[in-house]
Image: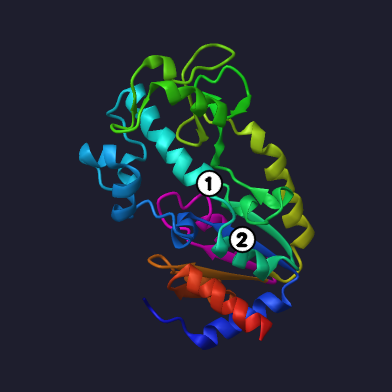
């Protein structure tokens, strides 16, 4: 693992100490650093043995996978949600990150849908997740702007779930919209059917937070955002840093730590492990 530069960490800890406000922009790299890595082949073999037998080796291979029946798809997602969402409580890395910002005027914008921020102490009213939430389910039509808690739908699959093959044995277990009877899917942005309106209050809260802090010292912590969906987190964090006169961008990423040249000294690039960054910076701040 690449050793982080101590002087850079000292500089970042000073930035955070002196900041009036902190905006966290979080991508998949943060959750991977917290122990849920969609490329982890060993973990996949343990959690998804039925799908390992089918020739798959990592969760990432099944993101957006089109060649399965509804019974196969929901059998997989039943296991996936129980592992990624329902079995996860407060996460030590997210708790350490919260300790970094808890005394500041902070806000979180994340592409992650696993709920680890609000499970680990972050306030829901300071949280915007434009890509959705694994704890919810929606109609794919959609016939309304309503979303439902997904847990009851997963519970109803249980009589039809084959734990060896990790598929549903009957279409009766496939979720159907309570309103219109159409197919349902996890409330995660995969196509134009995604219901944005349930996140409007979150979006407005972020806009208000940005307006309130436009002229203040803002540190933008970009943690683990890459190039799969750069318009969700990565590029907005750059634009905010550029537009705010007293903002600084700190980008931490194992593979994609580069920052735009036009940001100049307003940006700090740290190529390395996010967990190491958070824990070392936290240590320096309390020293």
Up/down of 198 relative to 58, above or below: above
Relative image position of residue 31 (x, y in whole percent): 48, 56
**Can residue 89 be seen here?**
yes
Split into 4 quadrants, where in the image is the C terminus?
A: bottom right
Q: Nearer the viewer, residue 158 or 7?
A: 158
Mark toward the viewer: 2 or 1: 1
Q: Which residue is mark 1?
A: 114
Q: Quadrant of residue 14?
A: bottom right
Tell me the magenta residue range: 219-246
Residue 210 x/y as whole percent: 72, 56
Q: Camera-side residue: 186 or 140?
A: 186
Residue lying at 67% horizontally and 50% vertically, measured from the top left: 127
Left or right: residue 44 versus residue 86 is left
Quadrant assignment, res 47:
top left
**Does the magenta-highlighted stretch encompass residue 159?**
no
Q: Mark 2 to mark 1: distance in Å?
A: 16 Å
Residue that badge 2 annotates: 24
* Dot placed on the residue nearer the N-terminal end, 2 or 1: 2
């Amino acid at each position: 693992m690449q050793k982080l530069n101590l002087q850079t960490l000292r500089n970042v800890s000073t930035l955070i100490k002196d900041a009036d406000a902190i905006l966290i922009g979080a991508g998949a790299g943060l959750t991977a650093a917290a122990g849920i890595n969609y490329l982890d082949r060993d973990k996949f073999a343990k959690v998804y043995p039925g799908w390992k037998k089918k020739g798959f080796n990592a969760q990432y291979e099944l993101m957006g996978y089109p060649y399965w029946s509804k019974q196969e798809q929901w059998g997989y997602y039943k296991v996936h949600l129980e592992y990624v969402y329902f079995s996860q409580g407060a996460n030590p890395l997210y708790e350490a990150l919260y300790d970094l910002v808890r005394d500041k005027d902070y806000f979180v914008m994340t592409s992650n849908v696993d709920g680890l921020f609000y499970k680990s102490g972050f306030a829901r009213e300071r949280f915007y997740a434009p890509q959705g939430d694994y704890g919810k389910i929606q109609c794919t039509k959609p016939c309304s702007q309503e979303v439902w808690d997904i847990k009851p739908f997963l519970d109803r699959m249980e009589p039809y779930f084959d734990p060896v093959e990790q598929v549903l044995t009957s279409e009766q277990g496939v979720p159907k919209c309570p309103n219109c009877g159409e197919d349902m899917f996890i409330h995660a942005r995969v196509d134009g059917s995604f219901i944005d309106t349930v996140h409007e209050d979150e979006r407005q809260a972020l806009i208000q937070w940005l307006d309130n802090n436009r002229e203040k010292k803002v540190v933008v912590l970009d943690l683990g955002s890459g190039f799969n969906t750069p318009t969700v987190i990565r590029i907005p964090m750059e634009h905010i840093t550029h537009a705010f006169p007293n903002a600084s961008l700190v980008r931490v990423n194992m593979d994609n730590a580069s920052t735009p040249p036009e940001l100049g000294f307003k940006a700090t690039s740290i190529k390395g492990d996010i967990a190491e960054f958070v824990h070392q910076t936290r240590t320096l701040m309390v020293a």
